[in-house]
Image (cartoon, helix red, strand yellow):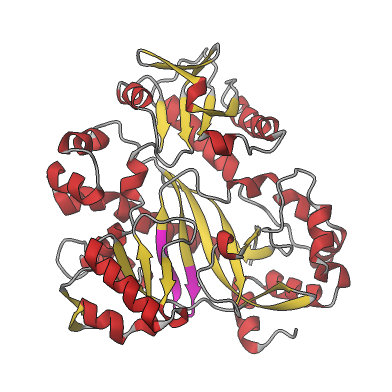
Amino acid sequence: MLLTSDLEATHRDLSQCDFNFRRFATETPDLLDATAILNAVNSCNFLTDTFQPWPTFVRRSKLRSLANVARGVANLLRKVPGVAFQGDFKALSGFYGLDSAEHGELLFASPNAIDVSLGRGDFIDTEDGWRCLEFNFTPSVGGWETSLVAAQYLQFPAITRFVGQSGVRPKYTSTIEALFNHVVEHAIRFGHPPGEALNVALACVPEEFAMVAPGSDDLLNDVLSAVLRRRGLTGRVGFCTFDDLTVSGRMIRWGDRPVRIVVDLTDGATPPAVFRAFKAGGFYLFNGPIERVLSDKRNLGLLSASIGTGTLSADEERLLARHLPWTRIVEPVRTRFRNQEVFLPDLLEREQAGLVLKKASATGGSGVLLGRSTDSEKWREACAEALANGHWVVQERVESRPYLFPLGPGCGPHDVVWGPFLCGQSYGGVILRMQPRSCEGPINLSLGATVGIVFEVEG
């Protein structure tokens, strides 16, 4: 496929290098053979057919802009529960479905892992700039593993030849390294004993632990060892289940090893004894039960609805106006849409083609309906359900710029979601999720999208 004017504009905006690579790739048979590329770089056994065979070369200034926007939106979302409920833990707990007001108060009592939480946003690069679709405050979100295979792409002969001819020096931000840097710095800041090993447990549910790829712990330990060595420390990291961890007072042990950091990959299903030990200050937990509150998509609706109410600073207003699509909790109320007051149920019917329905707690692309690709009867049924239970949001649809990636025996235009990682306040790299433009439905791996590697370049 030729690089049409809109595709050319997209890729030149990413970088001149990326535009040159697309032109080179469309003329290079080896780079149109997706299976050959993935087989060649699959030395770590992490790659599957969900990986995109072409990398993307993005100028650092564009990635810095994405990181800044992601950080700003994430920080505002972290504040939403506290600002919206003003210390009323009974109302907060009722809204987020917690057991009791006491449970809500305990979650937010220090330490709470909010400011240092790990997560990944979903952003669209539109003709008017970045738009945040949602933010997932969980370490279990996909894409971290790309750090372990990125370098393999640069060793594929055709890509090596392109890089050599171009004279570029592509770099990659390792999300795994950023994660370990973050948790180690946090442990040191809060008084980790200098002579003690700093061990990290990656706690999974048993079903996911059974699917961990062979050799994963060795690869992760290579990264953690380098991070610790720079600080004069030692330690180990590995996947486990919470059943492998023993709680003794404030302390956590994994066999004979004391554990200072637990990264909870169970979507917040932290055992009470482990959570109590964290609250007592014996170790640090990322992110734990607080992630279910922070990741609730209704926070986007609360934040969007706060624009123009006087609760935000001028800078916060500008940030949200530019980067957060109009979003509301689905309920039978009057609200403002495009500077007009409307009755939300009427709006859902009238503007179906330009709206997206999302279930507040859904993940992995489930519970998402795009109005333009949903049958009108199914849309009405979904809207009725959403209005009845109050656990859905509606968001104005935003359009991805077109990107050129392999498609079948050739290549074709794709829509792309950008997934910047944040480790607290630090940028932790980015993954792309892309889907052929001809497909309908959300851009999600469970629905047929692929994952793309991003290399950073100058210019």
> Residue 283, relative to residue 319: is it above or below?
above
- Say if the magenta span includes residue 274: no
Task: Count all numbered tags in the image, as a single digit.
Answer: 0
> Residue 438, relative to residue 223: is it above or below?
below
User: Which of the 4 image quadrants contains residue 318?
Assistant: bottom left
Image quarter hosting the C terminus: bottom right
- Residue lying at 50% horizontally and 51% vertically, measured from the top left: 421
- Residue lying at 59% horizontally and 62% vertically, measured from the top left: 432
User: Which of the 4 image quadrants contains residue 412?
Assistant: bottom right
Q: Report the span colored magenta.
A: 124-134
Compared across the picture, whether 131 is left or right of 83 comes to right
| Closer to the camera in the image, 16 or 385 | 385
| Closer to the camera in the image, 389 or 194 | 389
Compared across the picture, whether 287 is left or right of 410 comes to left
Compared across the picture, whether 331 is left or right of 148 comes to left
> Residue 179, relative to residue 244: is it above or below?
below
